[in-house]
Amino acid sequence: MRYRAEASGVTLDRDDAAVVKGMLDRGDRQHDIAAWFGVNGGRIAEIATGAKFPGIAAASATDLPPQGPYLSGRQAHQLLRALLVNQE
């Protein structure tokens, strides 16, 4: 029997789509963009192909997050643990 994880509930809106398009224009990898937003790479592909948010313009370079790659979940967890240990 197959089990499916619950949906994350993370959705992208028009403002997010503009940032996604700006990141794509900058040359960011779809994988890194998906990691930044915490979504499946398929959502980024839908924006890249125009299947979603076709009329939205790309955000300007000054409105974009820093270029990836970004920390993985494992790396973020290790960093958080190290920070908490150092607080004690």
Image: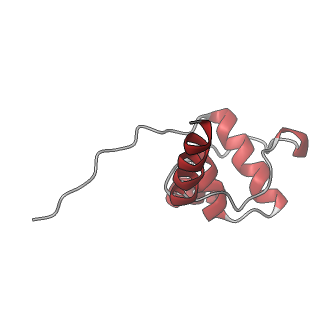
- The outermost residue toward the left is 1
Q: Name the quarter where the C terminus is drawn.
A: top right
Q: Would residue 88 be found to the left or right of residue 64 on screen?
A: left
Q: Position of residue 44 (x, y in %)?
A: 59, 55
- The outermost residue toward the front is 88
| Res. 8 visible in picture | yes
Q: Is residue 28 above or below residue 16?
A: below
| Res. 55 visible in picture | no
Q: Position of residue 61 (x, y in %)?
A: 89, 46
At a point 76% along the width and 53% down the height, the residue shown is 23
Q: Position of residue 65 (x, y in %)?
A: 78, 45
Q: Would residue 6 be found to the left or right of residue 49 on screen?
A: left
Q: Name the quarter where the N terminus is drawn.
A: bottom left
Q: Position of residue 7 (x, y in %)?
A: 34, 44
Q: Would residue 27 be found to the left or right of residue 52 on screen?
A: right
**Looking at the image, which is closer to me, 74 or 4?**
74
At a point 84% along the width and 58% down the height, the residue shown is 26
**Looking at the image, which is closer to me, 4 or 22?**
4
Q: Which picture quadrant has residue 72?
A: bottom right
